[in-house]
Amino acid sequence: MDAGKLNKRIKILRLTKTADGFGGFTSSETIVHTFWCAYKENSGEITQENGIREQRTAIEIILREKAANQILMSDVLQLESSNEKFRINDKFDSTIDKYTTIKAVTI
């Protein structure tokens, strides 16, 4: 993997709970990290569920292993230039090249 191919900026969002002052909690997504990655769209399947059509985009990102170790499987990914959010499905570490491949699908 050539470091020059890491040309997209990706935000890592994590769900956090904060006290609302009335004995309950408010959940919100907080930006935990931003990393450079190589981004590739694998498929763009259009599905229909409950009368609603939506496009499910499957992506693959490659980033440095040290950065990927800070990402949890429950985190949400978002490209810095887009509003689309992605749920992580698979994470693969390449021990030889020190890069991690993450596969995700739109939420």
Image (tube, helix red, strand yellow):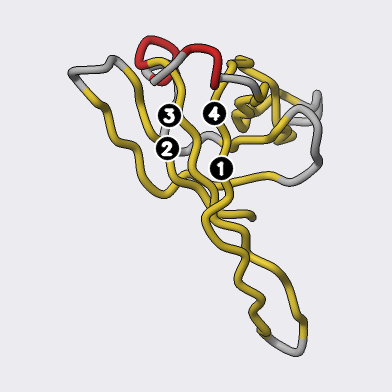
Determine the residue positioned at 65% across, 28% down. Answer: 17
Work out how far the residue at label 1 is from the one at label 2, CA to CA, in angstroms.
Answer: 11 Å
Q: Position of residue 11 (x, y in %)?
A: 66, 25
Residue 47, quarter of the rendered image: bottom right
Mark 4 — residue? 38
Under mark 2, the amino acid is Ile
Mark 3 — residue? 72
Could one spot residue 90 in this view of the protein? Answer: yes
Determine the residue positioned at 74% across, 46% down. Answer: 84
- Tell me the mark number nearer the camera, choosing from 1 and 3: 1
The reply to whether discs 1 and 2 touch (Cβ–Cβ < 8 Å) is no
Under mark 4, the amino acid is Ala
Q: Please, is residue 100 above or below residue 27 in the view?
A: above
- Tell me the mark number nearer the camera, choosing from 1 and 2: 1
**Element at label 1:** strand
Q: Please, is residue 56 above or below residue 36 in the view?
A: below
Could one spot residue 25 in this view of the protein? Answer: no
Indicate the quadrant containing the N terminus: top left, top right, bottom left or bottom right: top left
Q: Position of residue 79 (x, y in %)?
A: 70, 33
Work out how far the residue at label 2 is from the one at label 3, CA to CA, in angstroms.
Answer: 11 Å
Work out how far the residue at label 1 is from the one at label 3, CA to CA, in angstroms.
Answer: 20 Å
Mark 2 — residue? 102
